[in-house]
Image (tube, rainbow, N blue to C red):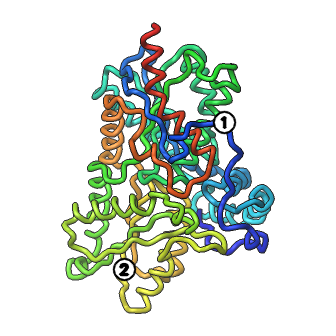
Amino acid sequence: MALRTPLTRAARRATSTATAAPALSVYSAQWRRGNATVAPVTQSTGSKKGTAIVFMNMGGPSTTDEVGSFLSRLFADADLIPLGRLQNYIGPLIARRRTPKIQKQYAEIGGGSPIRKWSEHQAAEMCKMLDQTSPDTAPHKPYVAFRYADPLTEDMYKQLLADGYGGGNGGRAVAFTQYPQYSCSTTGSSLNELWKWRTRLEGKRGTGEVESKGAINWSVIDRWPAHPGLVEAFAELIEKKLAEYPAERRDNVILLFSAHSLPMSVVNRGDPYPAEVAATVYAVMQRLGMKYKYRLVWQSQVGPQPWLGAQTSDTVKNLMKKGQTDMLLIPIAFTSDHIETLYELDKEVIGEDAEGHEGVKRVDSLNGSPTFIKALADLAKSHLHSGEACSPQMILRCPGCTSERCLAQKEFFARQSGQDKQEAAAA
C-alpha cells in the first residue's frame, strides 16, 4: 500500500509486537522446540478431477468502493501490521480514516487495482502450460485466493467444494504463494487464513472429525526467491528498460531494487523475508554480470514504529541531491502491478521525490511476461512431482515466534502427505 503517512496517536500507544493468538490445542514437545513433525512423503500425482492450483496474494480493491473493506481487513491482520493488544480497536479506526485518501489514490491509477486481472491471467496461462507439460496431474484448474480483497480465501475454498474437491470427494490442491520471498506477514498470513477455512469447512469444526475423510489434500509452494525463471524474467525486463538510456549513460545507471518493507519487530523475530529478497537481488545481479551499481531499498512503511530501511523514497531524494539522476527502480518482490508500483513508485517516488526527472525510471512489472509464466509452470510441475507437502524451510518457525496459530498451521501442512498416504492405502 502507498501508506507512508504516520498514523494516529492511538497507533503510537500500541505495543510494538503482536500478541500471540489463543492456544488452539495441545501440541507435542517437538513442536514447542520450533519444528513441525514431517509425515512420510508419498503423494499421488494423478486424479480424475485433476489438480487445483490456488494463487495466493494480498489482493487489492478492484473499484474505489471496495477500498474501505480492503483496508479494514488489512489493518485487522496482526501478521501484516502488528498493532499489539489494541489491534481490534486501532485497525478499524485507521481503516476508516485512511479510506478517503486511498480511494483518491486508486482513482488516479484507473479506479482500482489490476492485481486480480493479472493474477487470474497468470494462473490461467500457467495451467494451460501445465496441462501440456504434466499430463498425469491434469487437468489443472486455476483459482485465486486474496487475503484482503475479492476473491477472498473463504470464497475460494467454498468454490473448490462446489467444484467437487473435498467434501468427501478428496482431490489435490496446491497453495501457490505469489510472494516469491517468504514472510510470516505475507505468505504466512495467507496460509494461516487458508488453514482457518479448511478447519471451518473440512476440519473438526466443519465435520466433527479431526482428519475428515475425503478432504482436500493440500501441498504448498511457499517460496521461490532464486528460481532461474524468475531471475531471467526480472533480468529481461531490466535490460529492456536500460536500453532506453543513451549508451554513454547506461553503465552508470544505479539499480534500486525496491521491496515492501517490514516492521523491525517482525524482522527481529527472525522473519526470513529480508534474506530471501536479498537472495533474489543477488541472483538477478549475477545474471546481469554484476555490471551495474545497485542497492536493495524498502518501500511502503506505515505508522510510527521502526521499519526496515533504507526507504526507497529517501534513497531517491538523497541520490538526487548528490547529483545522481540516472536510477532504475525495480519492484523485486511484486509479481504484478498494483498500487505500490502504479502509485507509490510511479507517482510518489518518481513523480514527486525525483520531480519527474527523465533519468529516473521504473522497470515494468512481471504481469504477462511469457518468461515469468513459464517459470510459474516449471515451479508447479517440479512441486507436483516432488512428493513434498512443503519446503523444509516452511516447517521451521521463526526463532522468536510465539503464535499458536502459526504453530497449528505449520503442523497441518507438514502432515498432509501422510494423510494422502493413509487414504491411498484405504482405497
Please provide percent x and percent y for residue 362.
Answer: 40, 68
- What crowding class fits label 2: few (fewer than 14 Cα within 10 Å), some (14-19), or many (20 or more)? some
Q: Nearer the viewer, residue 128 or 30?
A: 30
Q: Is residue 104 visible?
A: yes
Q: Secondary structure at mark 2?
A: loop
Query: Where is the C terminus found, in terms of image quarters?
Result: top left
The residue at the point 48 percent across, 20 percent down is 171
- Quarter-of-image position of residue 134: top left
Q: Is residue 131 above or below residue 178?
A: above
- Give the percent coordinates (x, y) of residue 368: 39, 47
Circles 1 and 2, Cβ within 8 Å, touching? The answer is no
- The residue labelled by disc 1 is 25
Residue 244: % across, % down: 29, 71
The numbered mark at residue 359 is 2
**Count of labels in the image:** 2
Tell which of 210 and 50 is nearer to you.
210
Query: In which quadrant will I find the N terminus?
Result: bottom right
| Badge 1 or badge 2: first in the primary sequence | 1
**Front residue (pair 424, 175):** 424
Residue at horizontal 43 percent and vertical 29 percent from the top: 39
Give x and y (percent) for residue 388. 37, 33
Name the front one of labels 1 and 2.
1
Q: Amino acid at mark 1?
A: Ser
